[in-house]
Image (spheres, helix red, strand yellow):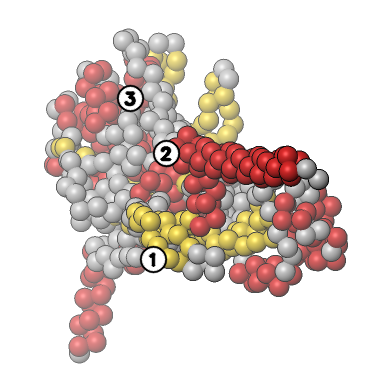
Amino acid sequence: MSKSAKQAKQNIAPSLVQWRFWVVIGVLVMVFIGLTARAAYIQIIEPDALIKQGDNRTLRTRNTPVHRGIITDRNGQQLAVSVPVRAIYADPKIISENEGLKDARRWKALAEVLGQDVDKLTASVSNPKRRFVYIQRQVSPAMADFVSQLNLPGVYLRNESRRYYPSGEVSAHLIGFTNVDDIGIEGIEKLYNDMLSGTPDTRVIRRDAQNKQVEVIEEQNGKKAENLQLTIDQRIQAIAYKELKKAVQFYKATSGSVVVADVNSGEILAMVNSPSFNPNNRRNVSAHRIRNRAITDAFEPGSSVKPLAVLSALEFGAVEQDTLIDTNPGWMRLGGSVIDDPTNYGEISLTKVIQKSSNMGTSKLALMVPKNFLLDLYYDMGLMSDSGTNLLGESAGIFHERNRWSKHELSTLSFGYNLSVTTVQLARMYTILGNGGIKRPLSIIKSSEVVPEERVLSEENARAILAMMESVTQDEGSGKKAKVSGYRIAGKTGTSRKAVAGGYGEEYVNIFAGVAPVSNPQLAVVVLINEPRGELYHAGDTAAPVFSSIMTGTLQLLNVTPDDKRVSSLASMLGRSDAG
């Protein structure tokens, strides 16, 4: 081979090596540029997505358990508490990935223990695109343990709480209840939901691959749930409910309500309705059983407001306490309508006007004073406004204010028609009578705040009207069945027909409202029996005995000193006999 050919081969070999070298260098440069671009894209242009993915794997939020505040009565007895329960939920994607639905035996066992249809249950968790499905909430710890032992893939438990009401139906209308998310939706639970609710303390932590905490990122304090103390005395509440429920069933009434109030403070000691419901199991409970009738349902009070006609005349100065009222001949015609009494009482005292519940007497007294003076008294006694409890759904009553009032309208107003009031409004009126003419708002929440007060009656006339009303519970009065052994009772019956289209029907509202003891008033009690069916439909036969039972139990429970002179005299005689 020639020398020139050898040189040509030597020149070709290095050029091939050099070409490969540059190719490799070029590839390395492109890879470097690509990695640099990708790193720049990830870290500068679009870092959030990867950060989020990393945080999803490592960051966890831990919440401390928080329970709703406790509701208690004035003595600390619990009326609403939160109890720990569990919720069963599923992750359909996990179930699908583990072919969990193939184990039909375990799913059937789960459905049976929860009382669900197995086909509906499995259908609800069969969509792998869903990540969270509640199977059942607020299950008992025993049931939760059984579910845990089933060890179904994709089925989990979580902690939550459920509201429990120890007093059951006794205080159901007043306390109300919460929904499955522990949010108040009725009664006190709804009215004070913000106060009773709390928010958990939260900690955001970072964990490693072994699920161990390695860092606390953030801590935040939640809002502590507050407890709530009511003015209610659950012992009195139980007495009132027991007697009311028994009466509603005995007289076959549609419903009934009772309010017991402290005349000196305006605090409500009991507020009950019948029929009631069990707040711990509200399945198939109709809406009409849930409402608090003592504050929502307005009715014409009838003769229970007749003392106001006497008071208006006394306050205006149209009569004196010993004035006689001529009711002859037992009837009169006003504006084409007749006002009458069951019999001609003739000339009677103010006490007899109330004792006999004379329509003629109250009508003449009401017409003795200017219209505005009479109407203002009704307003002052709290019959045309809310009671001050601020309870949800409270009615302010029904009163059609008008510029012109006929004599007949003023007359019927004096014996409890042409206006409608609630049980709690009537209770407020009687607290004013018992408190010597001082008006205070009624309260349901125990508080140390000073309650505003206003004098709306002279103390002399307020005491005088109580003495007159005491005759109602005496042997000749319409409310003698309201007597309480050992105590002087002042009260008034009220039997009013219910209004229907075009007039009044044959259904009645029976009321007895009263104050005790007369010598040192402590309590006001109002009993309402709505639509009693049967032969007994007068308040003296239906509401008065219930009043007596409730007042008796309450006075004894509160250890109120008896003030009946006959009982005191007998006790003194027995004491002297024992000493001898």
**Is residue 296 something one can see in this rendering?**
no
Badge 2 element: loop
Task: Give the amino acid at mark 2.
Answer: Leu
x, y percent for residue 67: 44, 59
Decide: few, some or many residues near mark 2? Use Cα within 10 Å; few <14, some 14-19, many ≥20.
Answer: some
For this orientation, the residue located farthest to the front is 2
Badge 3 element: helix
x, y percent for residue 561: 24, 66
Task: Give the amino acid at mark 1.
Answer: Gln
As drawn, 1 above or below 75: above
Q: Give the CA distance from mark 3 to mark 1.
A: 48 Å
Q: Give the CA distance from mark 2 to mark 1.
A: 23 Å
Q: Which quarter of the figure has residue 451?
A: top left
Residue on which disc 1 sits: 77
Residue on which disc 3 sits: 363
Residue on which disc 2 sits: 392
- x 48%, y 56%: residue: 59
Q: Which comes before the other along the chain, label 3 or label 2? A: 3
- x 58%, y 34%: residue: 507
- Comparing labels 3 and 2, the label whose residue is closer to the camera: 2
